Image (cartoon, rainbow, N blue to C red):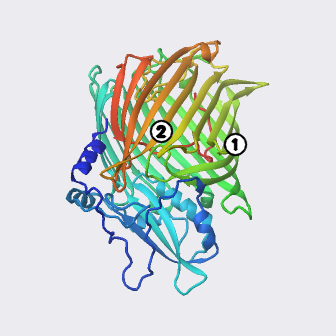
């Protein structure tokens, strides 16, 4: 349970001003600077709209000046920059939080002063800012430069979020976890976290993990991460560098992962324990062709090629044979992929909760991967394919789905293969008086194709049912997941806090053998909760959740409750990346 958001909410309700707000002074232009327009709250019905819509009237103009406005954690929001809270505790907390440096924000922009305005670049820059862990929300506003018909000034509005996080998880893997993290160290966008864990039934009982991450190093859009984990029976050290294709504007992408792992406890394979491995994984890709639709400037089609070299070697492991303990075979992969992407984004709000702007991908992704796998007992070819698409479904809402299949072709069959399917649907807003409703459905299915007899899906650490973490005794060769949720946005407002109630039902079917997945063991969880949001609250939405578990595959309490900051909306992305190995 993360106690920080609940404590802050109580303090806000006690000390926060109910409705008295005054105009914010921060971010206002000094004498002689252009008069930027502040954003006032718009009460119109939220809708899914193209992310580049507001920039289209300014296409082709020259960017005369860029101004970055940081909105304090407690007070204004990107929907209403004219507000500022007056309570003493909010002002004190604002001073305690690291303010993001202007250079950190400017490095995340895909345009600069003197450039010609490209609506696509501005829309992608806005989306990139919103995806930063230390940014609560972001908005880019274009203002006509006074006395100039071909120039414009750009205001980048960034809503700060509270970045120092204390977390307490009393039942994580039958232990206790206490963690401290800072997501915006010195306003540079660096992240550092340390967590200690207590396992009463283990020897030794104490463990800890720490990591340090640097986002967008020197404006290169490269993220670096160092990680060290030491738990009872497990130790891991890792270094990762990555530059994802978060926008076609970047053209180049790639990544490098170096990891050394030592495990002395059984995993999902009961006979496997005491192993040490080293991993080197490198990939690089480039956009090789781009088509632009003249009529639809926000929609782009690209062709992306990438290559990957992966080396996995075990220095200690259980005894292996050509047909047993396949995950512990030494292996080298040399892969290449070709990806076709046709994508654009819409933005909306009122998805899971009030407040934050969400970016919704639309379009199509098709990727084929092929290469050579030089494994310990055999040398063969590896092939994989992915098809994903997201689109509005008439007046019903939005749907996105992804199908992935990979394995080792042998004639007309695939060996050691994996088939994965996942999808997400959410409805348009439904109305009942002053209440608004939205429905969500998530479906996922995974199965193996001609796998070894001792192969199984590793469910360790995977949250299939909300509030439940499976231990490594849970095994299976196929899995079906179904999550259904209904959210009710109420008109209630108490001291500036809005309420969204939700109910959910999670179903997890884990099976083995040749029997249909519908004839396997069913596990479930049902529950309800409330999401509390206040403009300028600083940490987003706080969620209170209660769940009941009629049946689970592990020894677990029948009920659970949690209070934490709600997670951000995550959709299936339609972007290019590394040549894939579909994991089991």
| Label 2 environment density (alpha carbons within 10 Å; few <14, some 14–19, many ≥20) | many
| Label 2–label 1 contact, CB within 8 A | no
Looking at the image, which is closer to me, 271 or 288?
288
State the count of labels: 2
**Nearer the viewer's eye, disc 2 or disc 1?**
2
Q: CA distance from mark 2 to mark 1?
A: 35 Å
Task: Say which quarter of the image contains residue 238.
Answer: top left
Q: Crowding at label 1, few (<14), some or many (≥20) Cα neighbours within 10 Å?
A: many
Residue 42 in percent (x, y) is at 47, 61
Q: Residue at x 63, y 41 (%)?
A: 400
Which quarter shows the N terminus? Answer: top left
| Residue at position x 35%, y 22% in the image | 559
Name the residue tied to disc 1: 367
Q: Residue at x 51, y 65 (%)?
A: 109
Q: Which residue is mark 2?
A: 487
Looking at the image, is 575 positioned above or below residue 563?
below
In this rendering, does residue 221 appear at all? no
Point out the tag, 2 or 1, that comes first from the N-terminus.
Answer: 1
Left or right of residue 444: residue 135: left
Give the left or right position of residue 391, taking residue 483 as reference.
right
Task: State the image quarter where residue 78 is shown.
Answer: bottom left
Q: Position of residue 70 (x, y in %)?
A: 38, 65
Where does the image place residue 206, in percent across and percent down from the top left? 27, 29
Location of residue 518 in the rendering, given as x and y in whole percent from the top left corner: 61, 16
Residue 404, visible in the rendered structure? yes
Q: Which residue is drawn at the image coordinates 31% and 42% (left, top)?
A: 194
Q: Secondary structure at mark 2?
A: strand
Q: Tell me the quarter of the image containing the C terminus.
A: top right
């Amino acid at each position: 349970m993360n106690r920080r958001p609940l404590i802050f909410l109580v303090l806000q309700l006690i000390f926060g001003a109910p409705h008295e707000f005054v105009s914010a002074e921060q971010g206002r232009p000094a004498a002689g600077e252009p008069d930027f327009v502040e954003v006032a709250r718009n009460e119109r019905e939220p809708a899914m709209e193209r992310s580049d819509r507001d920039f289209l009237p300014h296409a082709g103009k020259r960017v005369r000046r860029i101004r970055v406005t940081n909105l304090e954690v407690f007070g204004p929001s990107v929907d209403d920059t004219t507000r500022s809270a007056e309570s003493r505790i909010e002002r004190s907390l604002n001073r305690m939080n690291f303010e993001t440096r202007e250079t950190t924000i400017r490095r995340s922009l895909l345009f600069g002063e003197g450039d010609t305005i490209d609506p696509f670049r501005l829309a992608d820059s806005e989306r990139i800012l919103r995806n930063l862990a230390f940014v609560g929300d972001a908005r880019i506003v274009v203002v006509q430069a006074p006395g100039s018909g071909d120039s414009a000034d750009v205001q980048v509005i960034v809503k700060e979020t509270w970045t120092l996080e204390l977390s307490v998880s009393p039942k994580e893997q039958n232990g206790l976890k206490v963690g401290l993290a800072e997501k915006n160290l010195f306003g540079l966008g660096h992240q550092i976290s340390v967590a200690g864990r207590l396992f009463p039934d283990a020897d030794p009982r104490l463990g800890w993990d720490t990591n340090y991450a640097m986002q967008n190093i020197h404006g290169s859009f490269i993220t670096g991460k160092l990680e060290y984990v030491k738990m009872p029976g497990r130790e891991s050290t890792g270094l990762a560098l990555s530059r994802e294709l978060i926008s076609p504007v970047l053209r180049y992408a790639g990544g490098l992962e170096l990891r050394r792992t030592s495990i002395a406890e059984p995993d999902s394979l009961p006979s496997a324990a005491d192993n040490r491995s080293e991993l080197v994984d490198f990939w690089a890709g480039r956009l090789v062709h781009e088509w632009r639709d003249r009529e639809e400037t926000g929609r782009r089609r690209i062709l992306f090629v990438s290559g990957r070299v992966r080396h996995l070697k075990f220095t200690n492991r259980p005894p292996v044979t050509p047909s047993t303990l396949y995950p512990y075979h030494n292996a080298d992969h040399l892969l290449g992929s070709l990806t076709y992407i046709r994508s654009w984004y819409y933005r909306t709000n009122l998805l899971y909760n009030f407040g934050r702007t969400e970016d919704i991908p639309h379009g199509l992704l098709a990727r084929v991967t092929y290469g050579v796998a030089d494994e310990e007992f055999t040398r063969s070819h590896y092939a994989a394919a992915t098809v994903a698409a997201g689109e509005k479904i008439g007046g019903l809402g939005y749907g996105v789905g992804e199908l992935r299949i990979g394995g080792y072709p042998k004639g007309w069959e695939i060996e050691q293969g994996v088939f994965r399917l996942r999808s997400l649907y959410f409805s348009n807003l439904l109305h009942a008086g002053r209440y608004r409703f939205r429905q969500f459905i998530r479906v996922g299915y995974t199965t193996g194709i001609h796998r070894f007899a001792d192969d199984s899906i590793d469910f360790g650490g995977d949250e299939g049912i909300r509030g439940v973490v499976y231990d490594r005794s849970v095994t299976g060769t196929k899995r079906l997941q179904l999550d259904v949720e209904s959210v009710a946005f109420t008109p209630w407002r108490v001291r500036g806090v809005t309420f969204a109630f939700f109910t959910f039902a999670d179903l997890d079917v884990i099976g083995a053998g040749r029997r249909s997945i519908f004839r396997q063991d069913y596990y479930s969880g049902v529950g309800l909760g409330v999401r509390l949001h206040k403009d300028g609250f600083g940490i987003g939405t706080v969620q209170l959740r209660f769940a009941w578990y009629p049946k689970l595959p592990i020894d677990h309490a029948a009920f659970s409750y949690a209070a934490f900051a709600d997670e951000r909306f995550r959709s299936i992305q339609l972007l290019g990346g590394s040549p894939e190995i579909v994991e089991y």
